[in-house]
Amino acid sequence: MYFKRGMILFVLGLFMIFFLSAPLYAAQSEIKIGTVSLLAVVTKSQAGLEAKKLIETKALELQKKYQGDQMELNKMRDEIEKKSSVWSMEVRSNKDRDYQKKLRELQLKSEDARFELQQLDNKLMGPLRKDLHEIIAEVGRREGFTIILEKTKMGINSQTGLLFADESIDIGDLILQELNARAGGAQ
């Protein structure tokens, strides 16, 4: 979430700098613009694929861990629905209370599991995002780019402000190669 907001502010800042200084800069040299889909690079990268696999494995592990609790809760609900008409008010009230207690416990466990998955995502993807930003800056300097824009989603519903970009300025494959090379060298 902070990553998206930061990227939006970064892109807007770059646009302002670009448009305010473009007339002066254009007289000095050629403007070179590139685009990259951060989401595409991360999801195609070796490190991103490995992280996704670990997160999915952990999610399945947590799902199996709480599956029994969910089944027990479903049984309790079914029992209440089927037998509530023949129970006394006191029995029904106790069963409802037990059901609500179990439901809250399962909801807390689910929240803990989501938090654990989010922590794992941050642990695995945080360094990858940092490397990605460093690589983009390195490639930008090395290749002489004036500006590199994020283009995960383009058009009217764009979250990055980029409404259109020709595919010829996409440098996603180059960034992906650099990211995979860096990950391969770090192993």
Image: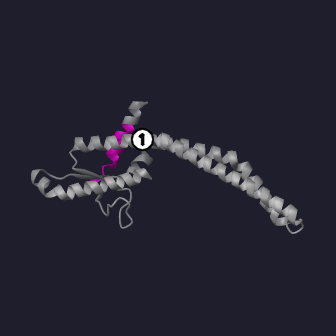
The residue at the far bottom in this view is 85
Instruction: From the viewer's side, name the closer residue of 77 and 101.
Output: 101
The residue positioned farthest toward the front in the image shown: 90
**As drawn, is 4 to the left or to the right of 77?**
left
- Give the residue drawn at x 32%, y 64%: 163
Secondary structure beneath dot 1 equals helix
Q: Residue 179: x percent and y percent?
A: 37, 40
Q: Is 173 contained in the magenta span?
A: yes
Q: Is residue 172 magenta?
A: yes
**Callout 1: few (<14), some (14-19), or many (20+) C-alpha neighbours within 10 Å?**
some
Q: What secondary structure is the stretch in magenta mostly built from?
A: helix
In-front residue for pair 61/110: 110
Picture coordinates of residue 13, whole percent (x, y): 28, 55
Where is the C terminus found, in terms of image quarters?
top left
Q: Which residues are magenta?
A: 169-181
Left or right: 86, with 149 as reference point:
right
Q: Amino acid at mark 1?
A: Leu
Q: Quadrant of residue 152?
A: bottom left
Residue that numbered label 1 is attached to:
128
Image height of 58 relative to 35, above or below: above
Image height check: is 187 above or below 16? above
Asked if one can make out residue 1 in the rendered structure from this viewpoint, the answer is yes
